[in-house]
Amino acid sequence: MSIDAPAVLGEPIPRLEGRQKVTGEALYAYEYRADEVLYAWPVQSTIVTGRILRLHTDVVLAMTGVVEVLTHLNAPKLADGDDGELLVLQSDRVAYRGQVVALVLATSIDTAREAAAALDVDYQNDGLDVELSAEHPKLYAPEEVNAGFATDSEQGYVDAAFATAAFTTDEVYTTPALFNNPMEPHATLAAFDGERLDVRDSSQGTSSVQQTLSTMFGLDPANVRVRSEHVGGGFGSKGSPRPNVILAVMAARVTGRPVKIAYTRQMMFALAGYRTPTISHVRLAANADGRLTAISHQSYTQTSTIQEFAEQVAEPSRHLYAAPNRLMTHRLAALDVPTPRWMRAPGEAPGVYALESAMDDLATVSGIDPVELRIANEPDVDPESGTAFSSRNLVGCLRRGAELFGWAERDPRLGIRRDGRFLVGTGVAAGMYPAMTSASGARVRALPGGRYELGVNATDIGQGARTVMAQIAADALGVPVSAISVDLADSTLPKGPVAGGSSGTASWGWAVTKACERLRSELAAGAPVPPEGYEVEVETSVDVDAMAPLARFAFGAHFVEARVDLDSGEVTMPRMLGVFAAGRILNARTARSQFLGGMTMGLSMALHERGELDAVLGDYANHDLATYHVAANADVRDLRVEWLEEEDRQLAPMGGKGIGEIGIVGTAAAVASAVRHATGVKVRDLPIQPDRLIGQLPPRFL
Amino acid sequence: MKTFEYERATSVRSALTSLGTPGTKPLAGGTNLVDLLKLGVERPDLLVDINRLDFGGIEPTDDGGLLIGAGVRNSDLAADLLVRTRFPLLAKALLSAASGQLRNMASTGGNLLQRTRCTYFMDTTKPCNKRDPGSGCPAIPGASRELGILGVSNDCIATHPGDMAVALTALGAIIHVDTLDGPTSFEIGEFYRLPGADPTRDTNLPAGALITAVEIPGLPFGAVSTYRKARDRASYAFGLVTVAAALDVEDGIVRDVRIALGGVSHKPWRASIAEESLRGKLVTARSFEAAADAELAAATPTEQNAFKVALAKRMLVGTLHELAGGHE
């Protein structure tokens, strides 16, 4: 290790496993083979709330190939794993439509599926309460909201500020229930060998799955191995164990045979976790030059009756702009619905949509250019904590975006640009996402001949973790990427955090850097590596805890052009530009994909995605990909990404801020802004589909 | 899923013989049937694969029309030069449907027989009068945003999901059918049916019959035609409202017109009232609007799909305006 190879961090290295993935060689959880495997198929409740009175399992057990039917009557008792959704088959209570009430185990997947469909269940039906509103009688203030943030915060006197403001806005912005739909549905293969449990799970973090399984099944963690070598996306829905892994392990325990389970696409809509519908009441007050004097963001979301999940919708409004008078609150209603969970940028995606839509409303009522309005409200320090930002380049993103997009030529008047039957407009919005880092372990082993084995419990959910970990190690060791082999997503590796919160790369990468630097210092230059290799293992708690108390956020600015068809109310986005300031970009190729993916998901949130609640039957009626619309290729036109060079020494040593989520934050607000600029109609309820516009569009013929 | 038998038909006659047994379904492209098999909505005992049968290609007819074999794939039909020149609305309707992969598989006959895509019909855990007669229609008080506004009944508000059939309805196509008792045919407006009190059947196709061909009668102004589709995303979405129209204008007067609407009813909706209202009228936005209003006066939407009335009007008026060579 005496020869320093050229630095590769930042270089657009192609994914190390790309060829394996496109040739089908890369195995996902469900694709592993096991002898004597059983196929599990969940039976889901067809009532919303009530009790299971009788399960007619005898009919199903008599079917050829059916081995066992697990129900609350015969399932093993589980310890509480801190998530009510995981306490499957533990009682006769039904808490939402689609909850698992039985699990059929059979020797083939088609038998399991047919048997599950044949299982009749008698219920006591206790009614339903599934519709969120800002006046719902069950609304309450949770103790804290997701990620440990304060439920309420208040500073100054918001109402008084409104009395004296030059400009005010007071509107309600809503987002519907949104559903995680990674390409690979949740899936597990679980097998016991005596007391040893081996699990292949489609998960964003094997350490947390291992811990939960150990707790819930009373197993020695040393006997539980969880691997997630390749994961086909997650968006947060695989960030904690889901019922699939509990069911598979339960079934493997009972039958003594390996068990496979995979959700169907339809099951995903009840059993994977989703983004709660959100209602944001946002009020802004500003003085004559557009400086905010008050920001009030009161949010309303839902959770289930079996597990509290409070999305931190108003949290981003505490940091994006300053004002002397501020009020941010979260109210939650526990309804008869599946438990909402993480979906890309929980809190920020719906919260910044609401705040930035309100800023667009303020720009309209004040006549101040929306870019300049945001720049005028740039805070010196984090408005919530009063601490400095480690770096904050929102203004840089806005200025660079305006330049690239041709913002200076924009005519601010609404609804005047006609191109045939289309109205054309442009819009802008800001985005932000916290740059978080948590402690991680890592180990690295030098082998004779100049090869290195890196072990880090990262998970590659498509973001490119395997590749960027190799790049980090290569630079820290001064060797080419080809000298590194990466072992990841295995709970037998040193413990690592989940691939979530846009914090994975910073967290794992810090441990990788530390391990490689230690190896380098412990192995004297030029000294031969012992035949058995030389290994070091590190952990970064001390380093992470020693970080200065600063506000760390990535920022972004979205500029979009909308075309609205006057005949159909359809909206298309011919141009989308995102400019981001996210510290150092560690792999230009995979980073670009992350930004593009986030922006595409933001476009999809703006224009397409909508869980359609059936308030009578109590579920989301459009639970497949034919009827729950995500953006198709044809919806995504000219998508452009830029990032600013940003050096921030107050981050993990690689200097990156995390980019998994920032791309989706603000996109929808920019789209709504552009649609208003085009048509004069401001839509405050997502998604912006023909039904939201058609009745309000100006006449087609004058 | 339920186990079923599969056989490959060697002749139309042998297929018809097999289809004579209840519980038998013909399998063409499978783009709808296979979905429904997986969901447990269709539970046949036997599938008769008719993909190897020769139903003929695309032939011009003496009256300037076309005869299209039932096995012609949607992508081939859309690409055909005769279709594109004589009946551009049909080519556009085909290309607006589904995805490239699905169009490569979907057959002309099978496309006509695709089932309703109401989410309740597709979900066997829920009531649906079409799937389970007498169980009720939860769509009416439920998620009805995409469902019907014309010709609906208290038992069903499902919509025909197709695009091709909407264009064929505007063209007054003839559906040729073979049965064990011999061939017969239906004008497309008689082929599809409204739900009424029996939504179980989408069409009047006799049990055990096979579609063999679709005939489009000649239409001199068929070349002045188009198809527009309003939908929730730019590709791979069923139409919220679609319009197939052909317009014959002379000296600023509507001499003749053909209009069909999709996404609004259990059948592709021939807008006869609008057509009648337009014949002999001046080509103006006002006559188009009056025609649309006349056609849509009978609409009985739900709260969730009331927007389709305004949408259908704007789509219809805009489409006719385009066909009239209108400039903005």
Image (cartoon, coloured by chain):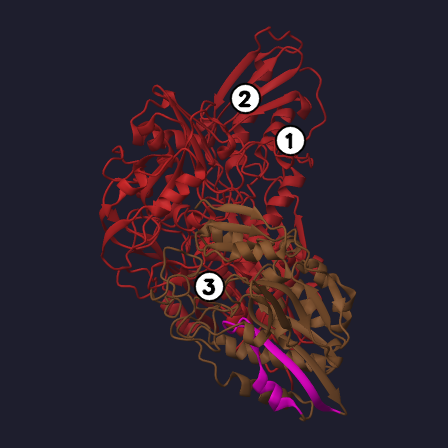
Chain colours: A red, B brown
The chain ID associated with circle 3 is: B
Query: Residue A576, image x and y in percent?
Result: 65, 58
Look at the numbered discs 3 and 1 and tell me whether their residues touch, using CB distance below 8 Å: no
Q: Amino acid at mark 3?
A: Cys
Say which quadrant the C terminus of chain A sits in: bottom right
Question: Vertical placement of B242 versus A140: above or below?
Answer: below
The Cα atoms of the two marked residues, 3 and 2, are separated by 57 Å
In the rendered structure, the answer to whether residue A282 lies left or right of residue A595 reads left
Q: Which residue is mark 3?
A: B118
The secondary structure type at the circle numbered 2 is helix
In the rendered structure, the answer to whether residue B276 lies left or right of residue A72 reads right
Q: Amino acid at mark 1?
A: Leu
Query: Residue B4, image x and y in percent?
Result: 47, 46
**Nearer-the-camera pick, B149 or A590:** B149
Tell me if mark 2 has few (under 14), some (14-19) or many (20+) residues whose alpha carbon lies within 10 angstroms of its own: many
Question: Vertical placement of A123 versus A549: above or below?
Answer: below
Query: Residue B64, image x and y in percent?
Result: 77, 76
**Nearer-the-camera pick, B195 or A682:** B195
| Image: magenta residue range | B252-279
**Nearer-the-camera pick, B80 or B59:** B59
Q: Does B272 lie within the magenta span? A: yes
